[in-house]
Image (spheres, coloured by chain):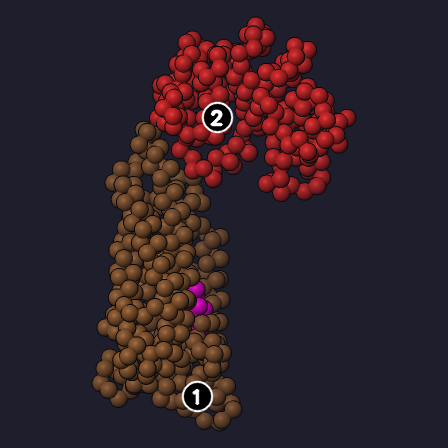
Amino acid sequence: MIRLEHISKIYDNDIVALDDINLIFAEGELVILKGVSGSGKSTILSLIAGLLKPTKGDVLVDKKHISKLPDHFCSQYRRDNIGFIFQKYNLIPTLSVVDNILLPLIPLNLDEKELHVKLESVMKMFSIVHKKDIIVKNLSGGEQQRTAIARANVNNPKIILADEPTANLDEKLSLEFIKILKELKSLNKTIIIATHDPLFFDLDFVDRIVEIHNGKLVCS
Amino acid sequence: MLLTPEVLTISILNLLFFIFASIAFYFSVKIVLKYDNNATTTMQYNLEKQSYLVATIIKFIFYFKVLLFVFFIFTLDDISNILPGAMCGAGVVNATQYGTYLLILKIINLYIFAYWLVLNNEDMKSEEQPYLKFKFKVYIFAFFLLLLEIGLESAMFFSIDTKNVVDCCGSIFSTTDGTYMAYLLNIDPSILLSSFYAIFLLIIFSYIIKNKYLFSLLNLLFVVVALVSLIAFFGTYIYELPTHHCPFCLLQKDYNYIGYFLYIFLFIGTFYGIVIGVINFTKEEENIKYKISLFFTTLYVILVSYYPLAYYMKNGVWL
């Protein structure tokens, strides 16, 4: 379970990104964070991922105080628990698909066999196995997106965070992404998506839509 | 005022240490007074960020200070070349009223700074940072010792007059002048050696029974006994001269810089031995520290014991 308790986030330039937010995400829940650009959606994702510290308040993931974790423990927490899908994919363009997916596994020092099993399974799951040796910059947007999703899932994280995942995709590819999302939801992963894409608002497998406006919750 | 390149280096570094240590001191006081691990306020989050930064500043100061101890000893030895009468670092230490106090304080600080580094390392290993407030309290105490050290060091270098003739180590560590040093040097070697080897064997025994407090205490005692026995007994075999008791000459090339090895072995061995009793390590880490301590202490004992034995085997007599 993820709890955000009285969270405020004020950036160094005095911009109030979040103002006294209280939110709970249950295990296995798929929640859409809806709001215009600058409303504070991405900040919530960054706080849950331990990429940012709040100015005030507490973030708890499975009773662990994420906001109180020293920085060097945040990376370990992210590696073990979080799969992050970014709007611009954040892949390394000069590496192949397989090398990009492999990246989060490097610190784990797994043996060759174990690596292979994990890679094959995740590439199959997200239908990218046939492109595994292609350099990422030569892939289409949809393929890059699938590579990014495979990378986010290779550690089998229990929380998936996606920040505007369909912003760079056309409608066909966006629908393909939604199909993948449904599959992830069936694996009982907690999924939080920050988006203003209307495609997400009428999905039957979405548990909740949370609207944020100017750093405050509008409805939940 | 003495301004050799080494003294200049130490003085500039001291100035930098003073500036950064003072900044760290200000924030340490703030952290000790206001840090509350359960709070989720803006101030607490700021203090958490500051604590990481300040701990990093202190860590670098203390790493440098520990390493610079060797450079300080080298500097003393180097300055002895330009002080009339001085044959080694002992003459430089004795050249001003501050030298002896500075040297004693530097040895104490060496252990305290190294202790802080280990404490910080342990604190950073845990998500809860169990030693956070404590390490900053220790730093506040260490800060004053650091200031005193910088003050004494500057005073010593400023008051050395290269025109004055100073005592050489032969007269400083003389057995006949009725000083505390003469008293130490006149301790019966059999008592000294019995204590030295008995403490070493007790250290091994306390390791076998895994009594960390006894191990720690014995290591503390071993530092003192090892230094006294080195000056009073073992040193004479390194020099192969019964009247030469200087703890500095053995740092020189004539004696293959053996002093550096001896002091480094003794420091590492006893430091890890002492620290076992004052910080709660995991069993695995404790075991590693036991082994490091025993390894270096044993190296020290073997090395100092080698000289009298080699002398006896070569000459058939003791000094």
Please name the residue that numbered disc 2 is placed on. A46
Place of residue B51 in the rendered image (x, y in percent of width and height, measured from the top left): 36, 41
Magenta stretch: dominant secondary structure: helix
Instruction: Give the magenta part as a residue range.
Output: B262-269
A137 displayed left or right of B76: right
The residue type indicated by label 2 comes to Ser
Task: Output the letter for the chain in brown.
Answer: B
Please give the label number shown on residue B240. Answer: 1
> Is residue B287 positioned above or below B35 on the image?
below
A2 displayed left or right of B20: right
Q: Which residue lies furthest to the top in this view?
A: A202
> Is residue B191 positioned above or below A45 on the image?
below
The residue type indicated by label 1 comes to Glu
Task: Output the letter for the chain in red.
Answer: A
> Which secondary structure lies at badge 1?
loop
Residue drawn where x is 28% and y is 64% of the image: B154
